[in-house]
Image: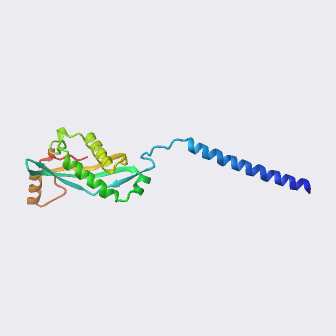
Amino acid sequence: MLKLAAAAIWIAAATAGSVFYAFQQASTVEAAAPASEPTAFGGLDYVRLNVVSVPQMKGGEVNGYFLARLVFTAPTERLKQLVVPADAMLTDAVYGKLYADPSIDFSRVDTLDIAAFRAGLRDAVNEKIGENLITEVLIEQVDFLSKADIRRASFRGWDSSETVESAPASAQH
């Protein structure tokens, strides 16, 4: 009976020691492993904005309207920590960038650099927030409607299946 009790105590001590050792090793490995960067396959969330409509001014009058639907990607955990809703903050930053940057001219598709536009929006939003929150700007839709396009569509009655004749002034991605 004494041998049985000694064997039980020895087994319990060996089990407790091995569990303690396993937990110690697991916490050491987690501390040593670098935090993985969020990718499109996990760790990122997206914020889809409503259609943004910004008038483009030239010579003191409206030349046309820039219309866009944009999607921003950011780490999920950081988005949850925002006090102000992300879409409101991002929309404000987009308007600020589009009004303040005279180099953005959507009426001239030949000079439009979409990659620079996306990077500029990302940088402007991150600067407004004060940290590198936004990882990427995705363009769901981009259009430019000149005043002439809008007049023709309003006189004919808008039909979404029709295309406006001055299509070169429109860029859609």
Which residue is outermost to the front?
130
Q: Is residue 44 left or right of residue 106?
A: right
Q: Is residue 57 left or right of residue 85?
A: left
Q: Position of residue 165 (x, y in %)?
A: 11, 49
Q: Position of residue 109 (x, y in %)?
A: 18, 41
Name the residue rendered at 12%, 49% in the picture. Answer: 57
Name the residue rendered at 41%, 56% in the picture. Answer: 81
Name the residue rendered at 50%, 44% in the picture. Answer: 35
Q: Is residue 81 left or right of residue 167?
A: right
Name the residue rendered at 29%, 42% in the picture. Answer: 119
Q: Position of residue 93 (x, y in %)?
A: 27, 52
In which quadrant of the rendered view does residue 4 lie? bottom right
Front one among 52 and 145: 52
| As drawn, 131 above or below 86 | above
Q: Position of residue 85 (x, y in %)?
A: 34, 59
Quarter of the picture containing the N terminus is bottom right
Numbered disc total: 0
Front one among 6 and 145: 6
Which residue is outermost to the right?
1
Front one among 50 and 124: 124
| As drawn, 104 above or below 93 | above
Q: How is the image coloured?
A: rainbow
